[in-house]
Image (cartoon, rainbow, N blue to C red):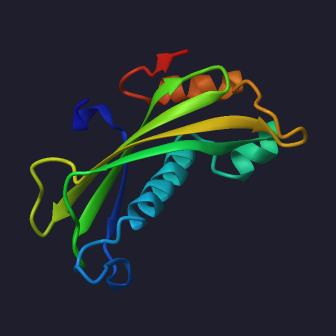
């Protein structure tokens, strides 16, 4: 996967409260950064969460799995770019791919973090998995630079 494959990019600056005693970003904060990028992704496809999705389709997406690989560490006051894309669309689930890059003051040569998250679409009333809406599938297909895998 290339950085150019990602269309959604959310930038942030590391805050003092996010670093630990080793003077690097505490590992759990990277998932918060990723969650913020997911919210930006939903805005960009025209379905801001939760109103654009939960209220419209009476479904919600629940995190099923998160796999994070740490390749480096960010430090206080560095600017980071959180890249987000959908890599696979299944019947009732979606796989997101993420990369977090250091932008400033010294750009990194590769991603600091790579991550894969799997979300399952659930009917709000029954609490059971439900097929992803066709409208969502089309919005994702239209938005992505690289077509997500199907199935």
As drawn, the residue found furthest toward the top would be 151
Measuring from the top left, give residue 122's x and y in whole percent: 76, 37
Q: Is residue 114 left or right of residue 120?
A: left
On the image, the x and y values in percent for residue 145 come to 36, 27
Q: Tell me the residue at 56%/31% (across/down).
A: 94
Position of 39 relative to 147 (above/below): below
Which quarter of the figure is the N terminus placed in? top left
Quadrant of the image occupied by residue 4: top left
Q: Residue reaching furthest right?
A: 125
Residue 125: x and y in percent read: 90, 41
Horizontal placement of 122 versus 17: left or right?
right
Count of labels shown? 0
Q: Is residue 73 above or below residue 121?
A: below
Quadrant of res 107: bottom left
Question: Left of 30 or right of it: where is 22?
Answer: left
Image-based side of 109 in relation to 101, left or right: left
In which quadrant will I find the C terminus? Answer: top right
Splitting the image into 4 quarters, where does residue 28 fall?
bottom left
**Which residue is drawn at the image coordinates 22% and 54% (left, top)?**
112
Residue 9 vertical placement versus 28 (above, below): above
Which one is in front, 140 or 34? Answer: 34
Looking at the image, which residue is at 47% across and 63% down? 32
| Residue in view at x 70 percent, y 52 percent | 50
């Amino acid at each position: 996967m290339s950085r150019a494959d990602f269309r959604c990019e959310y930038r942030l600056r590391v805050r003092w409260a996010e670093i630990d005693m080793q003077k690097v970003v505490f590992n759990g904060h990277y998932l918060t950064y990723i969650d913020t990028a997911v919210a930006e992704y939903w805005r960009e496809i025209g379905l801001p969460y939760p109103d654009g999705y939960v209220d419209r389709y009476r479904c919600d997406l629940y995190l099923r799995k998160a796999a994070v690989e740490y390749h480096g560490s960010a430090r206080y006051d560095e600017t980071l770019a959180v890249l987000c894309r959908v890599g696979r669309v299944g019947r009732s689930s979606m796989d997101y791919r993420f990369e977090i890059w250091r932008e400033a003051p010294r750009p990194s040569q590769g991603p600091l973090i790579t991550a894969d998250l799997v979300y399952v679409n659930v009917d709000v009333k029954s609490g059971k998995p439900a097929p992803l809406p066709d409208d969502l599938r089309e919005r994702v297909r239209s938005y992505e630079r690289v077509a997500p895998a199907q199935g």
